[in-house]
Image (cartoon, rainbow, N blue to C red):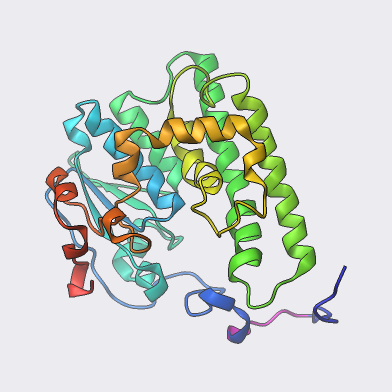
Amino acid sequence: MSSTSDYTPPKVWTWNKANGGRFANINRPIAGPTHDKELPVGRHPMQLYSLGTPNGQKVTILLEELLALGHKGAEYDAWLIRIGEGQQFGSGFVEVNPNSKIPALLDRSGPKPIRVFESGAILVHLAEKFGAFLPKDPALRAECLSWLFWQMGSAPYLGGGFGHFYAYAPVKIEYAIDRFAMETKRQLDVLDRRLAESPYLGGDDYTIADIAVWPWYGGLVRGYLYGAAEFLSVHEYKNVQRWAEAIFARPAVKRGRMVNRVTGDPSEQLRERHDASDFATKTQDKIAPGGAA
């Protein structure tokens, strides 16, 4: 195994801005806002502040699924937060999510707005609010929530671990890539074995567990993440492939993964969503707050 350096950790760590790789301009070891910026508020009950990353897609997919079921209270405005420009550190965003990560939701359907942050918490909040995609049977509910929290705990190894060192780190470190590739493949095997037993992660029905896991692991096996499908031999996981294709075929999933996207084919981008009719308009004409395309 090759070694990229003879680095020895110092006695006391200090922040070196130059070592941050692709995201050096937004990574920092402290929390809190960097500038004053109020968040825009639209006319719908749900105000979402997000970006079309896998974590952001979870919420827009669920909102589109709820609307497809006829839950009009799930109507939402999806405001674009450009994390590469540090918009998540604006004072208004930090008020909704003190962790300065997307997605963040402000539920304005009641007399007092409710903030919800962390994608898993948002999924549970919406599923419970509308009584959909979260089973009421105790055993099925437990299975669904177990897989939901599996995703919340596992995806950082895929994204911040494998994805970072494989695609974004300023130097390729064999040990780090090998370590996280091994863990990612183990996780895919966990999913594949579960999906050999049932059509969906929670059992026979599609739930927020699938909605949480699909943008990450479904996206990985469909070739959306890190250009790593061949490297990880994702074709080996036949049950994950079958599940990923079945979910991708859902119209609400196709809509949800378009919202707040700023990369890829322009025809698959809806940079902001303020009405269902927005999907029928030219997506490249959607303009972010402040006039930035």
Q: Position of residue 217 (x, y in %)?
A: 55, 43
Quadrant location of the C terminus in the rendered image: bottom left
Q: Which residue is drawn at 62% across and 52% down?
A: 158
Q: Position of residue 168 (x, y in %)?
A: 58, 70
Q: Is residue 28 left or right of residue 106?
A: right
- In front here: 15 or 225? 225
Q: Which residue is drawn at 33% across and 58% down?
A: 261
- In front here: 262 or 72? 262
Q: Is residue 62 above or below residue 141?
A: below
* The magenta segment: 12-17
The verdict on residue 79 being magenta is no
Q: Which residue is drawn at 55% across and 22% down?
A: 142
Q: In this view, does 239 lie above or below 185?
A: above
Q: Position of residue 285 (x, y in %)?
A: 16, 64
Q: In this view, does 126 lie above or below 117?
A: above
Q: Position of residue 137 (x, y in %)?
A: 47, 13
